Image (cartoon, grey):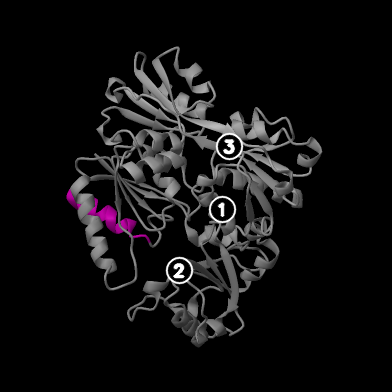
Amino acid sequence: MVVYIVGAGPGDPELITLKAKRLIKNAEVLIYDRLVDEKILSWAPPNCKLIYFGKRDNKSHPSQKIQRDINSTLLEYGPIKRVVRLKGGDPFIFGRGGEEAMVCTKAGINFEIIPGISSFYAAPAYAGIPLTHRDFNSVFAVLTGHESIKAKSSINWNKLPETIVVLMGVSKIQEIAKNLLESGREKTTPVAAIRWGSKLEQNTKITNLGDLAEGVNGIKPPTVFVIGSITTLNSKLNWFEKKLGAARGKKIVLTQTLTHTKKTMETLESYGIESVNMPLIEIESRDYILPNINDYDSLIFTSMEGVKRVGEKIDLKSFKGKIFSIGPKTKSFLFNNYGVNSFIGDKYNSEGLANYVLKYYNEGKKLLLLRSSAATKTLLNMLSPRFDVSELYVYDIKQLPADPELIKGADAIFVFSASCSKSLVKLEKELLEKITIVSIGPETSRYLTIPHITASIHTIQGMVDEYLNYLWSEML
């Protein structure tokens, strides 16, 4: 067996290597840190054991004890399982990846290192701060805050280059600033404090060494500091936060059911976007008889609502076969509410799910589709030629009329299903043509007879990203 010590990147799930994603999707044990995005964890297969080791700077979770526990876990599972040790950023850059590799070496456990994009250059890049520039510098230094202020630190403060990057330094940045001032730096030397680099929460604060030495309040981890005149380029090149800023103050109408809007509204609020509920569908109960699920090789769910309806009738843990979900939201709902893991495809729509099932199984399996009576026939049509497919409607969807008054003054409408599309297009085209219509995927777009954009990733976050990219392109 092999232990894969993998870099998860700086935060944005899309800033992870293809090899890292492939290994995660085939992991038997996944050991991960606090800063690993939840979406990345959703790639792990249902039978994967997830083990969390989050490091926190408090007495109840001392760093050295947590590291010993991590090492023990590597020794426990490394010889018998396919282990992915997932670390934020790059495992060999202030991540103790080298130490963990040595643990494997001493125990005779095979290991591989999969580099990741490090926050030391990704966060500045997302803040519009190039670490090298012909007009400013050709060299820089990277320090870790925890190590750089130790009594036996090997850092020669007098010989550091003009540009310095500090990781994990929030608690020590005041001492670091004082050391730099004592070595001859000017108090006015600019400093950029970049929090949550590459994530939608990213925020860059521009300050200087003098203020840091006095103590600046409001700077919290995770923050990357860039010290030096190169940080002045932030005002001209800060593309990511300008892109996020393009969405602030926008008003978006949500067409999904009221029971599903809370998470969407929270996501939009984090961007400074106002949301208005205009549900175009309503979930209705349906009487149905559930067969013996263990007569089937697989259950296939296309929504959280389907999971909920079936979960009301039986203990889903009693199912002995495989469960497939249409996307990470349904997968998470299954796990968090029923303790059941499921498989998802690479594309979170009916076609993507069908393709995944077709790759996973040979012919002859018995499959049970559990969904709404309004569901499209894509899954059934793609799976029926190779499998014995049964379809069971576990709830109904009622279309609701769109309200023109709620749309007035809106900047965009998010459309979440084919049923929502059918209801929306009944409005006057003149009203809708003035608003940006964002569809969650191709099946939803098929029924939109008005100009619209379609999310390439069929999730709420995918819709937000598509809308942001649209706004950004309009600004250029």
Q: How many other residues sit within 10 Å of disc 3, few (<14), some (14-19) or many (≥20)?
A: many
Q: Earlier in the sequence, mark 2 or mark 1?
A: 2
How far from the left and from the top, in percent, is residue 302?
Answer: 46, 32
Is disc 2 surrounded by few (<14), some (14 to 19) or many (20+) residues within 10 Å? Answer: some
Question: In the image, is residue 96 part of the stretch drawn in magenta?
Answer: yes
Q: Amino acid at mark 1?
A: Met
Residue visible at 66% across and 63% down? 134
Distance in Å between CA atoms under marks 3 and 1: 17 Å
Disc 3 target residue = 281
Q: Position of residue 22 (x, y in %)?
A: 40, 37
Q: Examine the rendered structure and indicate whether residue 475 appears above or below residue 373.
A: below
Let me know if residue 43 appears in the view. no
Which SS class for mark 1?
helix
- Residue 209 vertical position relative to residue 455 in the rendered view, above or below: below
Q: Is residue 281 left or right of residue 82?
A: right
In terms of secondary structure, where does tag 2 sit?
loop
Write the start and end of the magenta stretch as one range. 95-107
The quarter of the rendered structure image containing the N terminus is top left
Disc nearer the start of the sequence (3/1): 1
What residue sits right under mark 2 in the picture? 221
Would you place residue 19 above or below residue 372 in this image?
below
User: Residue sitting at 32 percent across and 57 percent down?
Assistant: 98
Q: Looking at the picture, how far across and down is residue 223, in whole percent?
A: 49, 67
Q: Marks 1 and 3: in contact by CB < 8 Å?
A: no
In the rendered image, residue 74, in percent from the top left (x then y), is placed at 23, 50
Residue at 40% x, 59% y: name it: 93
Reading the image, the residue beneath label 1 is 265
Which numbered dot is residue 180?
none
In this view, the residue in front, 139 or 13, is 13
